[in-house]
Amino acid sequence: MDIKARLVVEGFLSGLHASPFKGFSQEFADYRQYMPGDEVKMIDWKVYGRSDRFYVKEFQEETNLRAYILLDKSGSMGYGKKMSKLEYAKHLAACLAYMLFRQKDSVGIATFDRVIDEIIPPSARRTNFMMLLRTIEKAMPAGETSLHDVLYSLAQKIKRRGLVIVLSDMFDDPDETLKALRSFRYRKHEILVFQILDKEESEFPFEESAIFSDLESDSEMVVTPGLIRDRYRQRFSAFLNYYHQELLQSHIDHTVLHTAMPYDKALFAYLQKRARLV
Amino acid sequence: MTFLNPFFLFGTLLVALPILIHLWFRKRLKRIPFSAVRFLKITEARRFGWLRLREWLILAARCLFIVFLFLSLARPNLKSRVFGIGRRSSVFLIVDNSYSMAYGDNFEQMKDLALQVISMYSSNSEFCVVPLCASLNSNGIFWTTVASAKHALDKIQLAYGQAGIGAALSGAPKADAKYDIDYVYVGDGQAVNFRDYRMEAIEQRTLYWIRVSTGGNVGVVNVALKDPVAVPMEEYIVEVALVNYGRRPWSGKVGIASGAYYDEQEGTLQPGAEGRFDFRLPRNAQTGKAMIYDDSLSIDNVYYFHKRLPRSVNVLVVGESPYLAQALGSESDPRSTFLVRTAEQLGAVDLRGYDVVVFDGMQDISESERIRLIDHLRNPGSGLVMILGEGFGPNLVDFLSDYCMVHEPVVPKGYVIVDWIDQHNPIFRIFESSGALRDVQCYGYTKTEAQSGVIARFSGDDPFIVVQDNVAVITAPLNERSTNFVYNRAFVPVVLRLMMSLVQEQQRTEFYVGEEVVQGGLVKAPTGELMRAGEEFTLPGFHSSNGDKVCVNVVSEEGNLEALSAERAGILNIKEVYPNQDLGGSDLSSFFLILALVSILAELGLILLR
């Protein structure tokens, strides 16, 4: 996963971004007079020797982005012939994590289906990155989706504002899901939604009558695809458009990805978002 | 509900077939795991419920089709309510066993229906099962249980005699009935069988007639000598009479067989018509059968005959009147029926050479003549015809007193006519349809009184002809002043048959079933059974008596299958019960067949309806 992410990301990595926030780092920025409350270890004793005044060094902080990757591993994400949606989402998550790691950004991850399965808090350390990759790798499709519940729950847990990246097919009640996403916005998070779909889901190319069984429940249905294809496509398209319109209005980036697409689109979308955040 | 073909009910098990096919097809459908089934459901939200319902409705329609189809084939019947089911009654059940019921399988059908009737009543009911054709003895008829009634029904066989509903009803043991009596008749309801029926016989109640349908029938009603008077030389002619009782024209063959002799003719008969076919038979072929073919009711298609051909009779006419001798013909004519000799007085004429002595207008006889006559009449084959004159002496009166009392001569103002003859007397059988003697006028006769044996009367009720034993008395003189009888066309046949009857040539050789045996000795039936005088003939066919053939035939009227009309039945308070509708109940086959068709159409409709 690590290697694959590296290969994908290499072409897109164009250096570190300057942070508008100053903080603790290796890069010197300026001196300022000591003020009570500053740490004593920050006092530059050489300057004190020359000027008999207490000055403390200030460094330019390289990054301060805290990114949260929310990976949907519910049953519906297991759909896909050559590559399942979850596989695609996992690779994309790894790529994004790698990019963030390389940029010294803190990155964390949460996998979930109906509830949160595993959560790793954001950190820029390599060990954290390796743990994150293992968590991604472990994620297997199972269980029903309750995206909005999970998002509400995560919104409560994530205190510090940052970038929330949602990787899901969004097969949940759109209104509830949108409400949950908006709750992140209320907490000043930036949100990037990658809606990952399979081509068959949007085009419904089946020909023969068959029993379609739901991946998340026992529900099944005998369908003659030719009879309902047009109506299905219209419904599905309306579903995507609804999400898109509503998310746009809520200033949430929404990118629809198909499993057959290269990861570039997703990464560009991320970089554009990242650039806006600088 | 009952089923006439219950084994078809097993077919309803095939209802499992569409269910299995349904499940098999369902199993055969590819199962595709899909992530967006929620969208399929949303897409088909409105139709999803209908589609599932439609699927089940199609399956149900298929199942119903099979169930209804096999129910229809099983011929379900709703039981009749005509008699009520399980009613407790005293049931007087008349079953028609007359030979008309031999038409097709009517007899078996009748028994089935009668069983059905018995089964409909409560087991506590009591039954009298009476065959329509039987010698009834009311002392022998009593109410029985269901089992006995069924047993009695089982034992009833076809009979060949004449049947009468009235006679059958007369034997009903009404006084012993425990419950209200239901009168039920099962049969073809021939109109002739109802001739003796009176509503009083069932005390104004309803007679239920469970109808067994019949078709048409053609029967041989008689085989008669074409000329019963002429003495045949080498051959003679018989006339075979047929009647078509049906509603369609009949075409077929009529044959006659006697020993090695056989002849046949093609014939056609219009509905209701009687046809006569002449056959010329050798003189020695006097016993045989006349037959017709191509008819459904076969019992009356054969007529057994045994003909005694007319032979010359030696007649001695004693008297002065010439009319009789002239009318009877000449002694020299070999074909004449009579060999007539005349004598003015009986005197010393030897009577042994004569079969019949005719006293024509004799005033009186002597004592010795009286004794000789009595001796003569003791001989079998001898007879006397006494034609009274215009006066008579005491010996004659004394002689005749054994047969009839002779009173005074009568001279009516104008004339009297013969207005009654005994149609059943064999002497007049050949005049059944022609009304012989009806126009005989009499201007003077002798008033006589007879207790029995009167076979013809004048309009004043005085006897014209009296026959007793081997003596016949004609009360009117045979001359132009007294009667025109000798000029009547019936004269010769009547006198011949009268003389034949006296010389025992009248001994019948052809009978009908139901008539009594009159032969002196025993009669052997075709079954080998011996019958005595007074017993009834029960079977058609050749019987034998003292080496002579005796032929017994069915009553031709019984072959008339014309049923009692609905109008007449209504008048007589007879309720017709149609087995299919009223007794066997409603046949629901068509109903279920329609339901099966509706099911299959519904299925097709559902398949086309998307």
Image (cartoon, coloured by chain):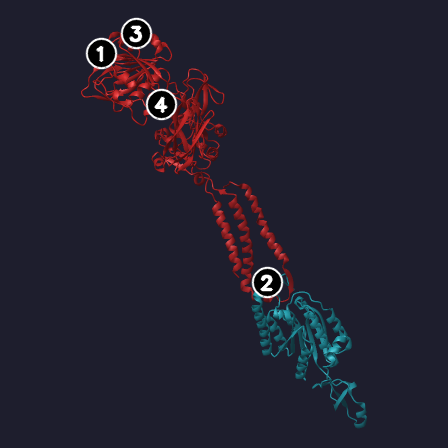
Chain colours: A cyan, B red
Q: Taking B444 as reference, is B73 above or below it?
A: below
Residue B370: give its label.
Answer: 3
Q: Which amino acid lies under the numbered mark 4 shown in the image of this protein?
A: Pro
Question: Both on one chain, marks 1 and 4?
Answer: yes
Are the residues under badges 2 and 3 in a single subunit? no
Question: Which residue is more in the foreground, B566 or A3?
Answer: B566
Pointer 4 and pointer 2 on the same chain: no
At numbered mark 2, what does the secondary structure look like: helix, strand or loop?
A: strand
- Type of the residue with mark 1: Gly
Q: Can residue B96 be seen in this view?
A: no
Q: Which image quadrant for residue B311?
A: top left
Label 3 Cα neighbours within 10 Å, binned few <14 / some 14-19 / many ≥20: some
Kindly state the secondary structure of the residue where label 1 is placed: loop
Closer to the N terminus: mark 1 or mark 4? 4
What residue did someone put label 1 on? B391
Circle nearer the viewer, 1 or 4: 4
What residue lies at 52% left-to-right and 53% top-to-bottom?
B600
Residue at point 57%, 72% (across, down): A238
